[in-house]
Image (cartoon, rainbow, N blue to C red):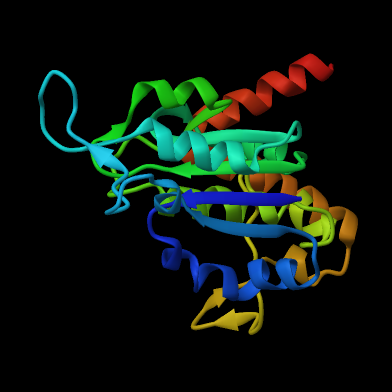
Amino acid sequence: MKISILTLFPHYFDNFLNESIIKRAIDKKLVEVEIINFRDFSKKNNKQVDDTPYGGGAGMVLMCEPIFDAIESIKTNDSLVIMLTPDGITYNQNIAVNLSQKKHIILLCGHYEGFDERIKTIVDLEISIGDFILTGGEIPAMIVTDSVIRLIDGVITKESLDSESFTNNLLDYPVYTKPADFRGLKVPDVLLSGNHQEINKWRKNEQIKKTNLKRSDLGAKYESSIHKEN
């Protein structure tokens, strides 16, 4: 899989791509990540990529030409172009799973007042990471990249992925490690029993309880999916 990130601040990603699971996935050649400065595609002498908005108003707007040229220089028939914008659909695990199955995704990071509306004509998907405003699209691009890479075969064990939060609309079950008793806070007896059938039953029940308590919206989706199966 290949992920291309178009940004005005390529060094923003230096540490992100050189640490932990992301670095190991790149080193194993499970994924290729390229960072492209779309300022390099400006035809202006000063490499300008933004200008004032028609009709007046605050801020500067990212121009069409350099972004069109940057995307067209790397886009293939296998590419999915994603704009990171508050206008987009809210990102979630289901979208991450879908993106992890693509051959090439292009992430377009915004800045300033926003994108010239015509840029959306060469975009396949608009994504928002939540109802708040950031200074640019770099952090959302990292979030999408991280969430997608960890789902690629060979990056993380399937067992770990199967038990994670949001799988089957449930949050993850509680986990514990040594010591079994810390300041009177004890690990549940069932986890020390060695009875894996009972452990799995306990974990599933805890997932359901935790989800209903903290995310009733997900709990309702889970109950709905159970009824459909039956």
Q: Is residue 165 visible?
A: yes
Quarter of the image with the C terminus is: top right
Relative vertical location of residue 162 with respect to residue 65 in this rendering, above or below: below
Measured from the top left, where is residue 145 in percent x and y?
59, 52
Figure disc tally: 0
Residue 165 image offset from top left, x and y in percent? 63, 47
Q: Is residue 197 above or below residue 96?
A: below
Please say if 184 is above or below 187: below
Residue 193: x and y in percent read 83, 69
Q: Nearer the viewer, residue 127 or 76?
A: 76
Please state which of residues 84 and 180 is positioned toward the viewer in this rendering: 84
Judge from the rendering whether residue 225 lies leftward or rightward of residue 165; answer left or right: right
Q: Nearer the viewer, residue 184 or 221?
A: 221
Quarter-wise, where is residue 92 in the image? top right
The quadrant in which residue 191 appears is bottom right
Q: Out of 198 and 110, give the one closest to the viewer.
A: 110
Q: In the picture provided, is 118 more to the left or to the right than 54?
A: right
The residue that appears at 66% across and 77% down in the rendered structure is 177
Percent across and percent down for residue 4 are 60, 50
The residue at the point 47 percent across, 31 percent down is 90
Q: Is residue 29 left or right of residue 182?
A: right
Any part of residue 176 in sight: no
Residue at 83% x, 19% y: name it.
229
Which residue is located at x 73 percent, y 45 percent?
A: 204
